[in-house]
């Protein structure tokens, strides 16, 4: 038995516990899986040439790093995407005026009628306005 293998398996158990207690985007679990695999490889002495063990460790390390980098890039890209749900998605969209905005009226956007406030000027029925903010159940718009 190899002490390094036992230590890596203990680290893997700790990483799995950390993943269970936090929301680490599966990074702790992935690191735990890598530690578990490496610990399993190092735990027993196999009757193979030393270069085979080194090659396997290098291969696992390269594949693990590649997977981690790809996952991290996807997570970062997801954080930079525009909000696709909730009232925040309305910001930047255009709406049709249903009742005159002087400065308050109603607009039609995304199949719904909203109360809207136009801080400057007025808008007639049929005009197009752009949503600049959502304030509760009211939209702030510009012409």
Image (cartoon, rainbow, N blue to C red):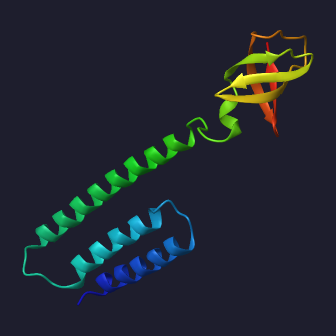
Locate the C terminus by quadrant: top right
Which residue appears at 68% of the width and 30% of the height?
90
Image height of 35 relative to 94, above or below: below
Front residue (pair 85, 39): 85
Please state if 43 lies on the left or on the right of 123 as rendered.
Answer: left
Which residue appears at 28% of the width and 73% of the height?
38
Front residue (pair 86, 48): 86
Total labels: the figure holds 0
Which residue appears at 50% of the width and 59% of the height?
25
Which residue appears at 65% of the width and 34% of the height?
89
The image quadrant of residue 9 is bottom left
Image height of 76 relative to 7, above or below: above
Please provide percent x and percent y for residue 129.
75, 15
Front residue (pair 74, 11): 74
Please state if 52 lies on the left or on the right of 22 as rendered.
Answer: left
Please provide percent x and percent y for residue 40.
25, 79
Please state if 76 lies on the left or on the right of 85 as rendered.
Answer: left
Please provide percent x and percent y for residue 31.
40, 67
Image height of 66 relative to 5, above or below: above
Q: Residue furthest bottom?
A: 1
Image height of 93 relative to 68, above or below: above
Locate the N terminus by quadrant: bottom left
Front residue (pair 46, 29): 29
């Amino acid at each position: 038995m190899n002490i390094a293998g036992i230590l890596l398996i203990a680290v893997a158990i700790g990483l799995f516990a950390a993943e269970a207690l936090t929301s680490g985007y599966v990074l702790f679990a992935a690191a735990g899986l890598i530690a578990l695999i490496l610990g399993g490889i190092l735990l027993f002495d196999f009757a193979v040439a030393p270069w085979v063990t080194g090659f396997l460790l290098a291969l696992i390390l390269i594949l693990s790093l590649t997977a981690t980098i790809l996952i991290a890039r996807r997570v970062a890209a997801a954080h930079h995407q525009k909000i696709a749900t909730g009232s925040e998605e309305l910001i930047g969209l255009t709406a049709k005026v249903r009742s005159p905005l002087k400065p308050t009226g109603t607009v039609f956007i995304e199949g719904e009628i909203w109360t809207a406030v136009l801080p400057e000027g007025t808008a007639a029925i049929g005009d197009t306005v752009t949503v600049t903010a959502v304030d509760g159940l009211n939209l702030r718009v510009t012409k």
